[in-house]
Image: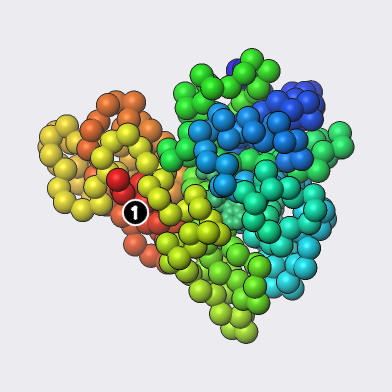
Amino acid sequence: MGIISNCTASVIKDAASALINGDLVAFPTETVYGLGANAIDKGAIAKIYQVKGRPTDHPLIVHISSIDSVDKWARDIPEYAINLARAFWPGPMTLILPRTALAKDFITGGQDNIGIRVPSHTVAHALLKEFEAQGGLGVAAPSANRYGAVSPTTAIAVEIELGSYLSKSDLILDGGPSIVGVESTIIDCTSNTPSILRPGGITQGMIEEILGNIISIESKNLQVNKIKAPGLMESHYAPKANLFLDGEPSEGDGLIALVNINTPEGVQRLASPINNEQFAQQLYSALRDGDNKKIQNVYVVPPSGDDIAVAINDRLLRASKR
Ligand code: TXA
Ligand code: MG
């Protein structure tokens, strides 16, 4: 196990072979880094759950290189889902669709549906292309963190987080910092109308622009989706520090806030993003930075807006739950 920084064609070839052979490959995506395994290899998938310390009834997202192979994994795909896929793939969006026989219980947590995503990051794309060229069908990849912890947005964060759990033959590919910074928008496409299970870089407004007014989009309360998306309700995305979303930081506390908000005397500023997009990009690395500095209390001034701020606030709320 080690970080590979220069992802040349031959590195990608070896990484794809590693996946075919049942090893784990952590790789960059535009949202966060994923911990990949061959989605039809039961033993390799078991390693993902082990390394993450994740309950096995939490389903995994299968990553493919293009929309063309979606029907290997999903059936009865509604027209609106195809329209969304055409508009936002490759990109930070996951569609939950009825599964085919290829999607076994060990991927779906026993559910009758499957999460599919086509990532846009060049390294992720190259890896998936090469994996498919070598006969692979899909790469299951949850965020490359221990269960309940903050998702990594850099290769070094993956190594710090999972290095001691990975084997010698597993790999970590470095593709630079993830540009979106929060996990993909998850859209349930198993009924007549779509609903957002997890907000992300593809916002409700962007979805509505594609689907028009014919289909209403309901951003469901995630608590209601207990059975459908088990990983989405309890304390999650949490740093070691206590996270506060209101109140004033005191000396020694950490602060994450938009640049126009001042840092009180003695407070450690962990990030000063200039807008909501940059807030999302910097949030997870700032939380990790706070933990590395052993800061016990981190204050975040949540951004407002109906853009990626919705996803940021969703993660902040869950990260602040204990
Ligand atoms: O941006 C992302 O989506 C990243 C990158 C690596 O692609 N992946 C990611 O995966 O965030 P993960 O496993 O950390 O989070 C996926 C969430 C989990 O809470 C899981 O329960 C839910 O999506 N999920 C996956 N498949 C599902 C399904 N078939 N039905 C409902 N929820 C599902
Ligand atoms: Mg995750």
Q: Position of residue 60 (x, y in %)?
A: 62, 46
Mark 1 crowd level (few <14, some 14–19, many ≥20, 10 Å Cα): some
Residue beneath the point at 75% across and 67% down: 77
Callout 1: CB less than 8 Å from ligand 1: no
Is residue 18 depicted above or below 38 in this figure? above
Mark 1 lies on a secondary structure that is: helix
Residue beneath the point at 82% across and 38% down: 136
Is residue 79 depicted above or below 269 in this figure? below
Q: Position of residue 2 (x, y in %)?
A: 60, 17
Q: Which of the pair 107/195 is nearer the observer?
A: 107
Q: Is residue 304 left or right of residue 162?
A: left
Q: To which residue does mark 1 refer?
A: 317
Residue beneath the point at 47% across and 27% down: 161
Is residue 309 depicted above or below 210 in this figure? above
Q: Is residue 112 visible?
A: yes
Q: Which of the pair 3/162 is nearer the observer?
A: 162
Q: Is residue 284 left or right of residue 241?
A: right
Q: Is residue 173 left or right of residue 14?
A: left
Q: Is residue 61 visible?
A: no
The N terminus - image quarter:
top right
Q: Which of the pair 58/150 is nearer the observer?
A: 58
Is residue 136 depicted above or below 244 in this figure? above
Q: Is residue 128 left or right of residue 242?
A: right
Q: Residue furthest top?
A: 168
Residue 173 sits in quarter: top right
Q: Position of residue 276 (x, y in %)?
A: 40, 54
Q: Amino acid at mark 1?
A: Leu
Residue beneath the point at 37% across and 47% down: 235
The C terminus - image quarter:
top left
Residue 251 sits in quarter: top left
Q: Position of residue 98 (x, y in %)?
A: 71, 62
